Image (tube, coloured by chain):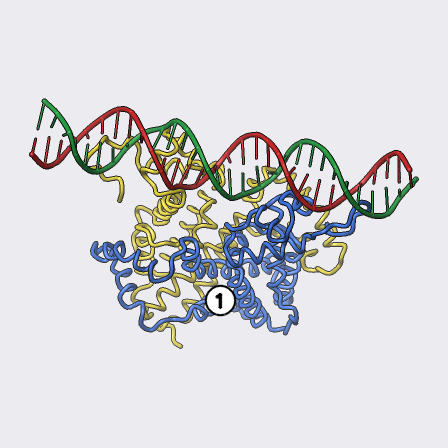
Chain colours: A yellow, B blue, C green, D red
Amino acid sequence: MRPEQPARGPRPTFSRAQLTEAAIRVADAEGLAAISMRRLATEIGAGTMSLYRYVSGKDDVIELMIDAVVADYLPPDLVLSGDWRADLRALAGRVREVILRHPWIAPLSGTRQQASPNRVRMLDTALRMVDGLGLSFNEMLTVIGTVFAYVNGFVESELAEAEALRRTGLDLMEWMTLQVPYLQSVVASGRYPMVVRMLTEGGQDYVDVGDRFAYGLDRLLDGIAARLPQAGD
Amino acid sequence: MRPEQPARGPRPTFSRAQLTEAAIRVADAEGLAAISMRRLATEIGAGTMSLYRYVSGKDDVIELMIDAVVADYLPPDLVLSGDWRADLRALAGRVREVILRHPWIAPLSGTRQQASPNRVRMLDTALRMVDGLGLSFNEMLTVIGTVFAYVNGFVESELAEAEALRRTGLDLMEWMTLQVPYLQSVVASGRYPMVVRMLTEGGQDYVDVGDRFAYGLDRLLDGIAARLPQAGD
DNA sequence: GCAATACCGGGTACGACGTACTCGGTTATG
DNA sequence: CATAACCGAGTACGTCGTACCCGGTATTGC
């Protein structure tokens, strides 16, 4: 909403969109911690303080980044099929994919859901998917909130290991080797038989993470469907 | 594991536990951003650099804080009833309560699930709840992961508004007033009919947030129960 | 045409941060 | 009783967000 032309004075050299793009690019590649006003400034070829002509501060940048990614939650060619389950399932999968492409958003997306243009758009679309099922409006809100709470929570833990590697700068092998002594003590203590089973037989019969995501989502949708007004009860 | 007595030299004046307690106290009252090494040092009456005798750095402090809160996820008097649904449901509710008491952990708990003593304990207990249901071990892991993904995701969004208030230092009235102009433009645009309904009829027939949590959790457990081996299918 | 006005880019500087390095004091060991 | 191991903590460096300020530039009103 800011980047309209100024009434007077020189034309702006930069733009909020340009800043947002640079911020997302840096965060995707190097994590949220790599974002600093100085870094963003050099990234777009500006002086540090010039950024403050476009944003009110770093928090504002974060908000712009979130809104830009949330915009991507909705596929550009989305059409409602009329099958609420299929529609919600597809949207949930899309949201997961987008978050995986922008891992830094996982801890932000839950904690900072300020009203913003694309969040409003997203919410409106999601609510439309569960309209006409005989639910009260607040029930509709609850259903949408529940589904995306699951999506967020799942993808966050899905990212946990990868983020730990990025934070520490270790590769997977080094990291696992580092945990070995502690896990050995866990096994040796004899107090955690289930965890021991996890360490010993966890490898075989491996379940793909995408399948695990789908499993939880489908069970959640099962449960919701079973309580829908037309489903009896 | 550190705070054993040193073989030689003077007795340590402080302890990891003391540091952890102070850190949690500060974060509970003022948020994660209030945590700094200098602040923690003055909080326990130490010089800043003395803390590095007990932790390897700030990241280590965060890890200690997380583990201490995770310890609380398990009620001290927990006994398994044999009813997996009731047990999981109770544990989920307990976890929610603990997170609400330590809001700063919400964005950390998902992204940083490093193996730590109390996380291992928690995982072992949760797995024991779903043992003997005819699930393969990896299916058990999936079920547990799913349930707590939901719990984390839900509580995170539950905390979003409260955290926004704390971050900005505004009270609820000021914050809502601040959003009014933007939301008016949303309504005026006419493109988001569902959001308009939310704003107009969202107030009536209000659903308690605890009930919303229970709704999603119960639907998820419904869906899981329906696919259990003994349930046919 | 020309002063006033509103906006631009960005330099300087301050306080807070994490922590590497270092040193003097203290306690158990051989 | 010298030595080794460990303690508390001061100093200092690089990085951070950003308040304040200034000189330049394009538009406005006379």
Q: Say which residue appears at 41% left-offset and 71% top-offset.
A: B208
User: Please, what is the three-letter code of the amino acid marked with disc 1?
Assistant: Leu
**Coordinates of residue A30 in the picture (x, y in percent):** 49, 37
Residue at the far bottom: name it: A233
Q: Is residue A18 left or right of residue A208?
A: left
Q: Which residue is mark 1?
A: B217
**Coordinates of residue B1 in the picture (x, y in percent):** 72, 51
Label 1: few (<14), some (14–19) or many (≥20) C-alpha neighbours in 10 Å: many
Regarding mark 1 in the picture, which secondary structure is present there? helix
Count of residue discs:
1
Q: Is residue B3 visible?
A: yes
**Coordinates of residue D28 in the picture (x, y in percent):** 12, 36
Q: Say which residue appears at 59% left-offset and 46% top-offset.
A: B59
Q: Is residue B28 left or right of residue B173?
A: right
Q: Say which residue appears at 69% left-offset and 53% top-offset.
A: B15
Picture quarter containing residue B136? bottom right
Q: Nearer the viewer, residue D29 or B88?
A: D29
Picture quarter containing residue B122? bottom right
Q: Nearer the viewer, residue A209 or B230?
A: A209
Q: Nearer the viewer, residue A82 or A5?
A: A5
Q: Is residue B21 left or right of residue B2?
A: left
Above or below, A226 against A191 in this view is below
Q: Chain of mark 1?
A: B
Q: Is residue A28 visible?
A: no
**Coordinates of residue A225 in the picture (x, y in percent):** 40, 67
Above or below, D12 against A178 in this view is above
